[in-house]
Image (cartoon, grey):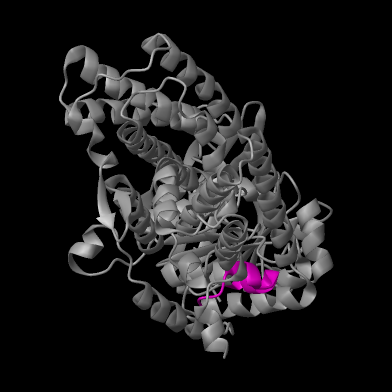
Amino acid sequence: MNALKAKLPPMGTLGPAIALVLACAFFSFQHENFLTLQNSALILQQVMVVGTIAIGQTLIILTAGIDLSCGMVMALGSIVMTKFAADYGLGAPLAILCGIGVTALFGLINGLLVTRIKLPPFIVTLGTLNIAFACTQLYSHAQTITNIPDGMNLLGETFPLGSAHVPYGVVLMLALYLGVWIWLRDTAQGRHIYAVGNSPEATRLSGISTDKVLLGVYVLAGVFYGIASTLTVARTGAGDPNGGQTENLDAITAVVLGGTSLFGGRGIILGSLVGALIVGVFRNGLTLMGVSSVYQILVTGILVILAVATDQMSRKGAR
Amino acid sequence: MSSQEHTIVMQAKGLVKRYGQVTALDGVDFELRAGEILAVIGDNGAGKSSLIKCLSGATIPDQGEILLDGKVIHFRSPMDARRSGIETVYQDLAVAPAMTIAENLFLGREMRRPGLLGALGFIDKKKMLSESINRMNDLKVGIRSMTQAVETLSGGQRQCVAVGRAAAFAQHVVIMDEPTAALGVKEGNMVLELIRRVRDKGLPVVLISHNMPHVFEVADRIHIARLGKRAAVVNPRHISMSDTVAVMTGAKSVEDLPAEALA
């Protein structure tokens, strides 16, 4: 019995999954179309961008940081890649790489400010949030970029799964989650990310360069935001200068709902996928019920506070 | 007993360390013999923590030299000291609370899996687990499961993990900076017992402590720091606690002590 108990994930890990099941049950009673295969595929498609941003966000939150700039950096990346393709005639792969390069550069700037000047991540990313937004508007002249090469839509194309159609981007997102989960769990680098979030002092005294770990995490998060840029361009077929606004908070919500502690060092990345699905399910379910988007934002806000409160209380319980 | 009979593992000669106008170390000497527990005591500002920082690589002395096994060494960082086989245990329980005991023992020194996976950074959890069990059993640390998070342990058990980690990896010397200061009576005794076992395994221990009963319980010799110098090295079996404190505070000078009290 005890052996079984030790093998099962702790309550903090199961909680988000239970919440997801409850949310699905609730909406399937509210609307008969909710639990169909088509709608499930739609939710996945809607979640793939936020879900991918949430991977980068999880890495940062695991180090006891936070990235408020994630959605805006993602939007900038999508503008850069679409404009480079449209204006300079770059092929899709090269244009996408340039976009990811810019989001990684923002990650590098965030990381350098956090590690070299020792600024709190909250303040740093509040600054880069605005910088990225302004860059997006200036560079795009607030215009949507539509004349993009076909190659950029590739990840938005779907393959049939039963009666539903699933975009390739969803498969990419799931593969990324799987890869990062294994990396965090089974490699020295992955464990060092947890250690930095757990106790930077103990990590430093163990001879690990905490600055290197942090810098790597911020740059890597930038790369994931760039991949999310690619996905959002593929999904909408355009570069949207007003993108990323809901994703910004939704990604943080997903991570927190997924059970990763805002205090750092605790959490499982697969939880963030569950968290992103919870956010997606709420948005989709409320839309099906005809609830206006303002109320969806209200609900997301309440969800975040609930999740953080649970985190705080469970930590107190552990002491 | 003359000191020639003892092998000196670590030695410092005339260390000077100044911080601006303040002279923290004023030509201090230090000697650690093989297989002993050497306590370092001193009032606040006597220079004991500056001395320990020099020995553990945390600060670089302005003058003087440090010898390890008779060879002059220059530590530029705690990592240098670690590479030379000197491990330090800190007062404030330097462990990562949400990580397992095994992970804490090997933090920063993870064992890699063989072959390609290891080159990619994959760690060998099974091997680390069995090694953790062996090493903790060696030190008779009675912790049931190495896969439990450190935060589930009591303060004393956590400190045992920190001491166990240092003892497992130290080749030459273990330095312990106030290892019992944050602990209750029973827990403190548990850690003292462990410190003795570390010495009995053959590793010399430098123990910095304010706690006189603890010092007198485990130390083989006591280095008394005073005014940035070494006031005396005494033998706890031939001197009283009050005389030791008197030397430490300057109320008594070394000449007032009987010859057998010195070590």
Residue B233 location, x and y as percent?
64, 62
Residue A160 location, x and y as percent?
26, 54
Vertical relation: A52 (above or below) B203: above
- Is B151 magenta? The answer is yes
- Is A191 magenta? The answer is no
Q: Is residue B208 left or right of residue A280?
A: right
Q: Which residue is at a point 53% across and 19% down the rendered structure image?
A: A130
Q: Residue furthest front?
A: A32
Q: Nearer the viewer, residue A155 or A24?
A: A24
Marker count (numbered): 0
Visible residue check, residue B181: yes
Q: Quadrant of residue A236?
A: top left
Vertical relation: A126 (above or below) A220: above
* Type of secondary structure dominating the magenta stretch: helix
State the quadrant of the N terminus of chain A: bottom right
Residue B160 location, x and y as percent?
60, 73
Q: Which residues are magenta?
A: B146-160
Q: Nearer the viewer, residue B157 or A189?
A: A189
Q: Which residue is at a point 59% across and 85% down the rendered structure image?
A: B142
Residue A189 location, x and y as percent?
37, 53
Q: Residue furthest bottom?
A: A1
Q: Which residue is at a point 53% across and 59% down the rendered structure image?
A: B88
Q: Quadrant of residue B163?
A: bottom right
Q: Is residue A23 left or right of residue B224?
A: left
State the quadrant of the C terminus of chain A: bottom right
Q: Quadrant of residue B140?
A: bottom right
Vertical relation: A205 (above or below) B227: below
Visible residue check, residue B28: no
Q: Nearer the viewer, residue B156 or A156?
A: A156
